Image: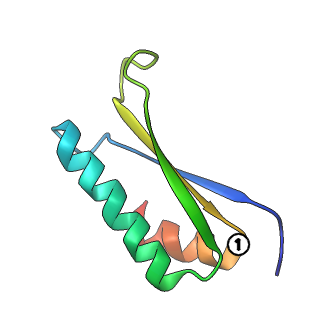
């Protein structure tokens, strides 16, 4: 099933420090590489200058909705 690029975002809301959130985002990407064939990459963006709530947001990219569902059930 090819539906183009699907983006999933995780934020650092659950973490009390910048580095812990970053490690969580990296762990999620490593997991996605191992379990989601359509995973095409990720990017961590510092949004602290633009957001009063979050310091970082991670964007994960997939090409298959089934992988998105699996990823969200595991990490979101």
Q: Position of residue 45 (x, y in %)?
A: 45, 36
Q: Position of residue 23 (x, y in %)?
A: 25, 55
Question: How many neighbours does mark 1 have within 10 angstroms: few (below 14), some (14-19), or many (20 or more)?
Answer: some
Taking depth in this image into account, of 1 and 26 the one nearest to the observer is 26
Q: Is residue 12 above or below residue 23?
A: above
Q: Is residue 19 above or below residue 26?
A: above
Q: Circle 1 sits in a helix, a strand or a loop, which is it?
A: helix
Q: Position of residue 25 (x, y in %)?
A: 35, 55
Name the quarter where the C terminus is drawn.
Answer: bottom left
Residue carrying label 1: 65
Residue at screen point 83% across, 75% down:
2
Name the quarter where the N terminus is drawn.
Answer: bottom right
- Which image quadrant for residue 29? bottom left
Left or right of 62 on screen, residue 15: left
Residue at screen point 37% across, 17% down:
52
- Which image quadrant for residue 17? top left
């Amino acid at each position: 099933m090819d539906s183009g690029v699907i983006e999933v975002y995780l934020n650092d809301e659950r973490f009390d420090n910048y580095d812990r959130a970053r490690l969580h985002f990296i762990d999620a990407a490593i997991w996605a590489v191992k379990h989601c064939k359509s995973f095409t990459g990720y990017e961590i963006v510092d949004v602290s200058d633009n957001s009063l709530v979050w310091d970082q947001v991670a964007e994960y990219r997939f090409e298959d909705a089934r992988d998105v569902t699996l990823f969200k059930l595991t990490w979101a």
